[in-house]
Image (cartoon, rainbow, N blue to C red):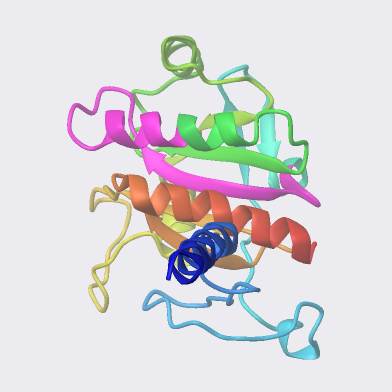
Amino acid sequence: MKITKVFLLISLLFFSCQTAEEKGSRVASLPYYNEASFTPHWMEPGSSDLANFHTISDFSLMNQEGETITQKTFENKIYITDFFFTYCTGICPKMTANMEVVQEAFLNDLDVLLLSHSVTPEHDSIPVLKFYAETKGVVSGKWHLVTGSVEEIYRLGRADYFVEEDLGIAKDSEDFLHTENFVLIDKNRHIRGIYNGLNRADIDQLIEDIKTLKKES
């Protein structure tokens, strides 16, 4: 009887350890996304179907160090992007804190970068972004806080990253862009995931999904 109980205990411990080891990304590979509903498309990396699939378009912005940041800055990099503004007292502080969690997880990983766009570029000048970066633990070279023309930033947010959830509602740069979403981009400029930047469980999942994406790369 005692032997049976010991065996059951060992079995339970083994199962628990195995389950813990298997925790991670939800899937062995990540889907691709190409429009605002974020309907997943399951394709093999390198598939010919990706030749004409949605990618992030070219851009040119300025970061907190006064450096020009373009799509080439993220060439052959995985990156996570979001949209914020420095004087936001609502969702942005929590988003920034959670982006810092991601930064810490990949601080010494040269394959992973972070990109945060100011949605009030007329206010968030380079000095303002620099001060914000210094107060929020932003590591230059790892995490780019960018400003530029409102037209370009809003176009990227709505037409490239699909960060808003107001499907079917036409908007332009006169309509304020405010969203808690983080978007995961692979080394080929494809969208591979969207996450609630206020939700710690989503942030943990984002970190695991980045690891999955690194294995794919």
Instruction: Determine if residue 186 is in view.
Output: no
Residue 98 in picture, x, y percent from top left:
40, 36
Q: Which residue sits furthest bottom?
A: 49
Residue visible at 38% across and 54% down? 202
The answer to whether 177 is drawn above or below residue 189 in the figure is: above
Q: Residue furthest front?
A: 1
Q: In the image, is residue 188 part of the stretch drawn in magenta?
A: no
Magenta part of the protein: which range?
Answer: 74-99
User: Residue 200: x percent and y percent?
Assistant: 34, 45
Give the residue at x 27% y 66%. Answer: 165
Q: Nearer the viewer, residue 204 or 152?
A: 204
* Count of labels in the image: 0
Q: Quadrant of the N terminus?
A: bottom left
The percent position of residue 178, horizontal first and vertical second, equals 26, 47
Kindly tell me whether residue 138 is visible in this rendering. yes
Q: Position of residue 154 (x, y in %)?
A: 40, 51
- Image quarter of residue 94: top left
Q: Is residue 176 above or below residue 121?
A: below
Looking at the image, residue 167 sits to the left or right of residue 81; the answer is left
Q: Between residue 131 and residue 181, name the one nearer to us.
A: 181
Choose between 2 and 169: the one closer to the eye. 2
